[in-house]
Amino acid sequence: MQRMPFYGAYKSLSHYPDYWYWKLRRNPVRSPHLLKQRAVIDYARKFGLRTLVETGTYYGEMVAAVKNHFERVYSIEYDPALAQRAVGRFERDPRVKILEGDSAVVLPELLKSLAAPALFWLDAGYWGWDQLHRDPERLSVEVESVLSHPVKNHVILMDDARMLNGQNGALTFAEFQSRVAARFPDRAIELRHDIVRITCR
Ligand SMILES: C[S@@+](CC[C@H](N)C(=O)[O-])C[C@H]1O[C@@H](n2cnc3c(N)ncnc32)[C@H](O)[C@@H]1O
């Protein structure tokens, strides 16, 4: 089903029922995509961020939902078929650039070209994705490269925070929080709706 041409449209249409089903179940930890879209838009607005960098494009759902709120959107996808599909989907929108490759390599490269604060939506299957090897260190590499960048007021939103559970080599959220706090004491870290939010104090 996922490889079929209408899958992207089907996913877009499913966001509203997904959201109401989540409300009906009294807001379980795993949050619906609509809520994630709102978090991205709210943080961009609140911190005046005009550039979005996403790791993990997948079917381009986040890009499609929020691109009108940004001047520039970069999205990094490892899977060549998904990356090419997204290139086709957004080829007529000059704001959107899909970058194919491993986010742990592409993100630090991309950062070299950023001169203004950006919003980072980190969502590249850090705890395992299909056949890709899980690599708990990849997330730390990316967070470190964003927070140590010369532009100090980037904002990071990181999805699937429930996976920071201390299992299979992952840190717990408390460990992750104290690592970031020790290295970057000027940053605030908050966890809400399965999204870790790192901002400048
Ligand atoms: C949860 S999906 C992303 C969903 C998307 N961000 C959204 O909000 O609609 C995870 C994606 O990360 C991609 N991915 C996995 N490992 C990656 C890596 N090392 N670099 C870039 N993308 C990766 C997967 O192929 C998959 O498309």
Image (tube, rainbow, N blue to C red):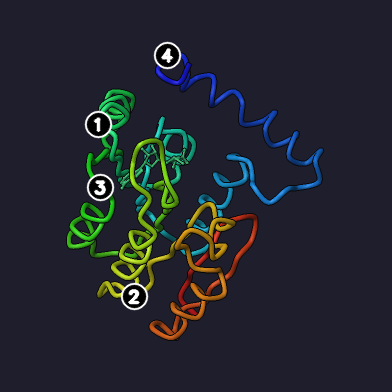
Q: Nearer the viewer, mark 3 or mark 2?
A: 3
Q: Amino acid at mark 2?
A: Lys
Left or right for 3, reference 159 = left
What label does residue 54 carry, if any? none
> Can residue 92 be seen in this snapshot?
no
Q: Nearer the viewer, mark 2 or mark 4?
A: 4
> Can residue 169 be seen in this snapshot?
yes
Give coordinates of residue 189: x percent, y percent.
Answer: 53, 73
Look at the numbered disc 4 and say if its residue's Cβ is closer than 8 Å to ligand 1. Answer: no
Look at the numbered disc 3 and say if its residue's Cβ is closer than 8 Å to ligand 1. Answer: yes
Give coordinates of residue 67: x percent, y percent.
Answer: 41, 40
Q: Nearer the viewer, mark 1 or mark 2?
A: 1
Q: Amino acid at mark 1?
A: Pro
Q: Which residue in the rendered view is the most extreme toward the top?
A: 5
**Is the residue under label 4 in contact with that under label 3 (CB below 8 Å)?**
no
Which mark sits nearer the N-terminus, 1 or 3? 1
**What is the number of callouts on the image?**
4
Which mark sits nearer the N-terminus, 1 or 4? 4
Which mark sits nearer the N-terminus, 3 or 2? 3
Q: Between marks 1 and 3, how big is the CA–CA gap? A: 10 Å
SS class, disc 4: loop
Mark 3 — residue?
102
The correct choice, above or below, for 84 with respect to 71 in the image is above
Which mark sits nearer the N-terminus, 1 or 2? 1
Mark 2 — residue?
152
Q: Amino acid at mark 3?
A: Asp
Q: Mark 1: few, some, or many residues within 10 Å (few <14, many ≥20)? A: few
Mark 4 — residue?
4
Q: Ligand 1: which quarter?
A: top left
Give coordinates of residue 169: x percent, y percent.
Answer: 45, 63
Which mark sits nearer the N-terminus, 2 or 4? 4
Mark 1 — residue?
80
